[in-house]
Amino acid sequence: MKGLKAILFLMAVSPLCLAVKPEHEAVLKQLRLPYGFKISIYAGDVPNARQMALGERGVLFVGTRDGNVYALRDNDGDGVAEQRFTLAKELYLPNGVAYKSGALYVAEVNRIIRFDEIEANLDNPPKPSVVFDKLPSDKHHGWKYLKFGPDGKLYSAIGAPCNICNPEDKLYGSLFRINADGSGFQILANGIRNTVGFDWEPGTHHLFFNDNGRDNLGDDVPPDELNQWTGANLHYGFPYCHAGAITDPEFGAKMKCGQFQGPVWRYKAHIAPLGMRFYTGQQFPEHYYKQLFVAQHGSWNRSVPQGYQVALVKFSQGEPFSEQAFISGWLTASGQVLGRPVDVLQMPDGSLLVSDDKLGVIYKVEYKK
């Protein structure tokens, strides 16, 4: 009887119950994690789930590249979202989401918008206000990652509108920041082909960002990059030099790689590192503290696919020194792709959420002693 009452309650209040489907359970059975870790479905119907942000009241916001922005809510505190609200439709690749002071910020290709008092109005979201609208409108690498930094400023990036080219407009291939009200636009770095993931190292507040390398140089060239921004207006090489050491055959003839900032870590080629998160929670074992979790979306045109995992990049004294798989199994031995991780978000209890834009779910990762 209690179970029936709970079902009736959810039917009465929920715009959409996020049921876990059999195909989700089938994928879970294929995923491999270190001993003691458990992975489950936090929300089971979130089409094209991309970047995530957490509100003050525990609402999870999810951007997409299909035009929608979602809010997910765990009504009963059981660690599973029961409700999904569609906050916006038909936006221009609203991949990036960030939350601050009651407002949800959404990055479209050509602008950043804001929904005020959003957690109190999930079922009737307000009309968004425009924060900044002077971004290029090119669709190629136009989707954006969005996050507030330790300085309270809003950070994002503008990808190159091509596989390989040298745009005249220096807005392309840049990392930038603005104030929360849209003022104070500042380019921080150039020569970045396409970053869709960055985070600040705990303690030092050093900014690290992923960069997806160019295509059509072969299966294993160039490596994708993990870079560090040190506060200077640095150039990271694109389109002249890749991964700090590989001269581009089309644009690198008159440039030397030594004049550009190289990566602090080289991933395998074409694994597409996207969202990343330094772990600061207390739930995982101590050796995970201040280590970097990276969602590797997976190769799309490599003859033998690779990536399709959440990797752990280990740091010591502010520098990465090793990389290992943390969650694997989305790529089967036969080459079948079951899912594609996009972003990693830490919850207040120290668990992690991982978005998957292929399966359309949010996973929850916990450590059970």
Image (cartoon, grey):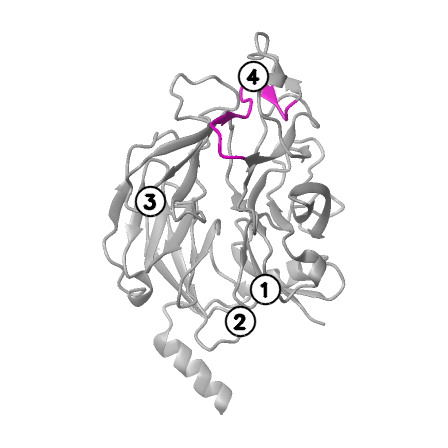
How far from the left and from the top, in percent, is residue 80?
Answer: 52, 70
Circle 4 SS class: loop
User: Where 86 sits versus 245, above or below?
Assistant: below
Give the overall secondary structure of the magenta segment: loop
Q: Are marks 1 and 2 in contact (CB under 8 Å)?
A: yes
Of labels 3 and 2, earlier in sequence is 2
Numbered disc in front, either 4 or 3 = 4
Image quadrant of residue 306? top right
How far from the left and from the top, in percent, is residue 34?
Answer: 74, 59
Q: Which residue is mark 1?
A: 351
Q: CA distance from mark 4 to mark 2?
A: 47 Å
Numbered disc in front, either 3 or 1 = 1
Image quadrant of residue 25? bottom right
At 62% across and 27% down in the image, what residue appears? 262
Q: CA distance from mark 3 to mark 1?
A: 30 Å
How many numbered callouts?
A: 4
Q: CA distance from mark 1 to mark 4?
A: 40 Å
Q: Which residues are magenta?
A: 230-244
Q: Which residue is mark 4?
A: 240
Amino acid type, mark 1: Ser
Circle 2 SS class: loop
Side of 124 relative to 193 (left or right): left
Image quadrant of residue 258? top right
Side of 167 relative to 116 (left or right): right
Q: CA distance from mark 1 to mark 2?
A: 10 Å
